[in-house]
Amino acid sequence: MKRAPRRHAAGLSLPELMVALAIGMMLVLAAISLLLAVRAAYLLHDDRARLEENGRFALELISRAVRQAGHRDWGVAGSGAAALQPVAGLDARSLRDAADGIAGPYGSTVNGSDVLALRFEGSGEGGGDGAIQNCAGAAVGADGGQGGWSIFYIANDAGGEPELRCKYRGPGGWKSDALVRGIEGFQVLYGIEAQPGAAPDRFVSATAVQAQAGAWQAVGAVRIALLARGTQADADASGAGSYALFGAAYEGSADPGTVIQVAELPAASRRLSRRIYGATVYLRNRVQEAP
């Protein structure tokens, strides 16, 4: 009786299997690399969009408060027995809640950032009718001339992240709220009117205004500059250089914080996306006379 011939099982040899595994691993690694690159690009794009939103939002908050500065509610009896000084400020300061207004003691300054204080009367009796709000979004009423406050400054949160903050006086005393994270530079210049009602002929720092008696009453406009940063490392960021918040033509070289050197920032943040935002806002409520 003859035996049936032996059939060899079909399949891959060991060398062929090793080659297939190697090619498969290369394809997997290529796919992972592509996925990581797409994810990084998405995160950077999202970070830049958030940076743009934060910068514009912070600028709009401050600009709106400047336009409201000096408001008086002439419809309320006894309104504005004493006119409020619409605007005041400090150079290279950071505030604490415990102090009244912009008085000391002061906190740690963030990149030489300034303080901008705006005063105004409320609208409506009691707690107000909501037409006039402070920087925290709370209604301010016409309270016999005491008025409301919107004070902007920069401070670090508990994790060391710089943020734009709002200080105001509430029913229980002075408070502050975080407004926008990632704002690491805040500079303010004040436009001085040579004659009442004329356009400002020069913009100077708060220190220069304080040096001239009565100069705060001559402020007709406020120039704002913000430096906002993202949270994702940006390949386009060199980690060096500087940011001139008022441009290279600004002559206030002695004004701290107007030029921020990247090399002087924390090492972990030097390659983050950054952008400068600025605006010049004119005070609307300069006339202190009843219509």
Image (tube, helix red, strand yellow):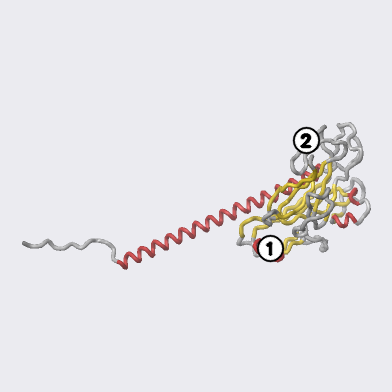
Q: Nearer the viewer, residue 250 or 168?
A: 168
Label 1 sits on residue: 266
Within 10 angstroms of label 2, few (less than 14), some, or many (20 or more) residues?
few
Seen as rendered, the residue at the extreme left is 1
**Image depth: mark 1 or mark 2 in front:** 1
Q: Nearer the viewer, residue 251 or 14?
A: 14
Residue type at tag 2 = Ala
> Within 10 angstroms of label 1, few (less than 14), some, or many (20 or more) residues?
few
Q: Tell me where residue 265 sits by quadrant.
A: bottom right
**For the residue labelled by badge 1, is the local secondary structure a helix, a strand or a loop?**
loop
Residue 255 picture quarter: bottom right
Q: Point out the residue furthest to the bottom here.
A: 15
Pinpoint residue 214: horizontal percent, then vertical percent.
Answer: 93, 51
Please count the marks in the image.
Answer: 2
Which residue shows up at 59% across the image and 53% down it? 45
* Percent x, y of residue 58: 72, 48
Callout 1 touching callout 2 (CB < 8 Å): no
- Badge 2 is on which residue? 131
- Of label 1 and label 2, which has the lower sequence position? 2
Question: Is residue 107 depicted above or below 171 in this figure?
Answer: below
- Residue at 85% over, 47% down: 87
| Figure quadrant of the N terminus | bottom left
Q: Does residue 241 appear left or right of residue 191 in this picture?
A: left
Question: Which sits in the foreground, 268 or 224?
Answer: 268
Separation of residues labelled 1 and 2 (CA atoms): 42 Å
Q: Where is residue 181 drawn, in percent x and y?
A: 68, 51
Residue 245 horizontal/vertical position (percent): 75, 58
Q: Is residue 6 left or right of residue 147?
A: left
